[in-house]
Each structure stands twice: as structure tokens, then as C-alpha cells.
Amino acid sequence: MIFRNDILELSEMNLEISRRKIVKHLYKYNLLQILRRWDDLFWALIFPIIMATLFYATFGSSTIDNMKAIPVACVHGENIAFETFLNEMDGEMLEAEWMDEEEARKALETGKVSGIFFAKTEPSLTVSSAQMNESILGTLLQTYLQNQKLMEDIRDSNPIGLLGAIGSLTDYKELVEPVSTGGRTMDGSITYFFALVGMACLFGAFPGVTAAMQLRADQSALAARRSIVPLHRLHMVISEMLSVFAVQFVNICLLLLYMRFILHISFGPKWPLLLPICILGSMTGVAYGIFIGSLRMGEGAKTGLLVGSSLLMSFLAGMMMGNMKDIIEHICPIINRLNPAALISDAFYSISIYENPARYGRSLILLAVFTAVLVLASFVKLRRERYDSL
């Protein structure tokens, strides 16, 4: 009896070793097949690089590298100190124009200015949207109010040190430093590049579709031979996904390196935080492709569905219209939470501009959930396939 149990354990061990060898074998040859499919590599790597180059040529290096003065309307009031602050900001940070309140509101409605500063006892700002320039104006006002509060606290607690504190804050231009894409970019055109990375991640679905079709025995002779391999269906799905992911992750890294060192577009100083975005974004794109590939429809229909849905999600993320994601955020924010391209773009925003760890983490978690759901859905779909003959 003991001898029989030993034989069974040995057989199970040999079977497990054989399965591991099969998985490694599949992974290796999947990689070779992917690298030989130039049409998939074109959409996953070459096309995003071409788009990035065209964006750069369209916007021009000056549009990306320099921060332009933001046009604002200023309304006189009783706060002389705030008026002085706005005048000192005029020319570099701001393109300020003093006018009465009615004229200022008309200028805001027509889009002539990005916001209105009111030099009242309590300074205020009015904007019509939540785009990049408006966010900068809000930060500028917040900076002024924080320093005003600081002066008041010093005056109440240590009047002797008030003069020294005032001297350190005399030059308000030092409080907000315009930075090029070598640091914190403030140009709205960067939104197109963030959305482009999201699109590039989704285009990892092209090799993903091909990989899924190689798991459907009714789609190719290779898939028919694979269907008799003694390997769990989920292991085969994961093996295909990991091989495509490895290539797609390299594609995204090459795209970012091209944009950074050839086009000189900066994504901020926290490069290590870009890796989780690239990893999850690539996995999401590949999982999306495998899910579409697992559907029961023709190859042409799958390609059409993939192209249409990917471009739609990229459009909603702001690749064709820079402020589209902000518009959707105000009208129906749930769309941005369900759009992988918008999540990828938002994650880049969170570390490159806003420095919002909570928003960054939320985007990554939603991408991970989205990927897991797609993988499980693909597994269930492929597992249920039955064939009368091959």
C-alpha cells in the first residue's frame, strides 16, 4: 500500500513537472510568434510613436517646453495688497487686464480670459471650467491666501519677526515658478500625450486578440493542436497573456523613452511611479484583446470592434480633444472610472502634475480590477467552448 502511494505521488510530481515544462514551452514560442507578427507590432509600437511625433510637430516644441502667461480679468476692490500681488504676477505667470465686473464676466463667458480675480477684502477667483489654466489660477490664489494667513499668525504671535517674514515674501514671483517640461509642465497640450500613452496601452489588445484566437480550436490548426494539450485552460490563458504582456510592456517603455529623450516631453521626476502604470496599463490592454478574441465572431468583426472601442475610449480620455476627460468628469464621472484609457491618463496626471497619491492609487486599483474581470471573463468564455469535430 505504501509502495502504491509512493508511485502515485511520483506520478503526480512527474505530471506537475511536465505541466511546468509545457507552460514554459508555450511561453517561449508565444514570444517568438508575437515578434514575427509585424502587423500587431505596428499597432502596438510603431503607430503610437508616429502619433507622438505628429503631436509634437503639430503643437511645436515651444508649446510643450514653455509655459504661457494665462489671460485673466482683474476687478478692483479694497484689497490693495492683493492688487499689488496681481500686478507683480502680470507679464510672466499672468496676462492681467483690469476691468469692471460686468466686462470681466462677459470676457469669461466668451473665453477671452481663463478666470476673474476679485481684489475684495477676501480675495476670490471665478472660473468657468476645471481645465489646466484654471487649476493653476486656483493654486496661485491659494498660495497668496496661505502666505497672508502666515503673516497674520506671525503678527499675532511674534510681531518682532514680522519684518523679516515680509522681506522673505516681498518678491511674489518666487512663490510660483513657471517650469518647463523638464520639471512640472503646465501646458495643456501635455494632455494629448497622456491620452496617447493610454491608447498605446489599449493597442496591446491587437496581439491579445491574435493570442486568444490561438486558443480557439475552431480558428486555426495550431489552436486545434493546442486544445489536446493536458493543461488547464486558465494556465493556457495566463501563458498567452504573460507572453503578450512582456512584449507590450517593452513597447510602452520604448514609447515613453522616445517621448522623453527624443521629443523631450517630461513626465515629472518620479519615474519609478510610472512603472506600475505601464505594467497595469499593458496588462489591461492585453486582457481586453484576449477577451475580444474569445468572443464568437469573425476575425474582421473582432478587429473592427477592437479598433472602434479603443479609439472611442482614447477620444473620451482626451486624445482628440484635450479637455474631453474634464467635461465627462463633470457630466458623468462614472465613464472615466470605467474607461481604461482615462484611468491611465489620470494616473500620469496624478504623479506628473497634481501629486495626488490617492488619485494615483485609485486609478491603479481600478485598472487591476478591470484586468482581473477581463481575464476571468475570457477564461469562462474559452472554457465553455465545445467542438463536435476539428
Image: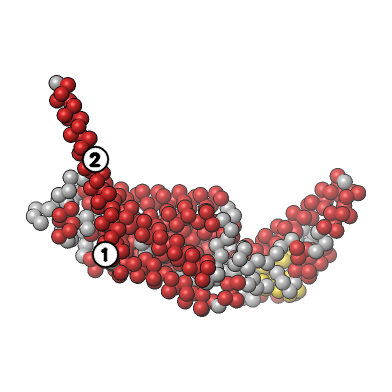
Image disc number at residue 17? 2
Q: Position of residue 384 (x, y in %)?
A: 19, 49
Say which residue appears at 33% left-offset and 53% top-offset: 242
Nearer to me, 115 or 222: 222
At label 2, which amino acid type do we have?
Answer: Ile
Q: Which residue in the rendered view is the most extreme toward the top? A: 1
Q: Are marks 1 and 2 in contact (CB under 8 Å)?
A: no
Q: Is residue 109 left or right of residue 238?
A: right
Q: Amino acid at mark 1?
A: Lys
Instruction: Work out whether residue 322 can be spotted.
Output: no
Q: Residue at x 72, y 58 (%)?
A: 143
Residue 308 placement (x, y as % from top left): 34, 68
Can you identify the residue that label 1 sits on? 302
Tell which tag, 1 or 2, sits nearer the viewer: 2
* Residue 319 or residue 207, whichever sits in front: 207
| Residue 74 in picture, x, y percent from top left | 74, 70
Foreground residue, 58 or 227?
A: 227
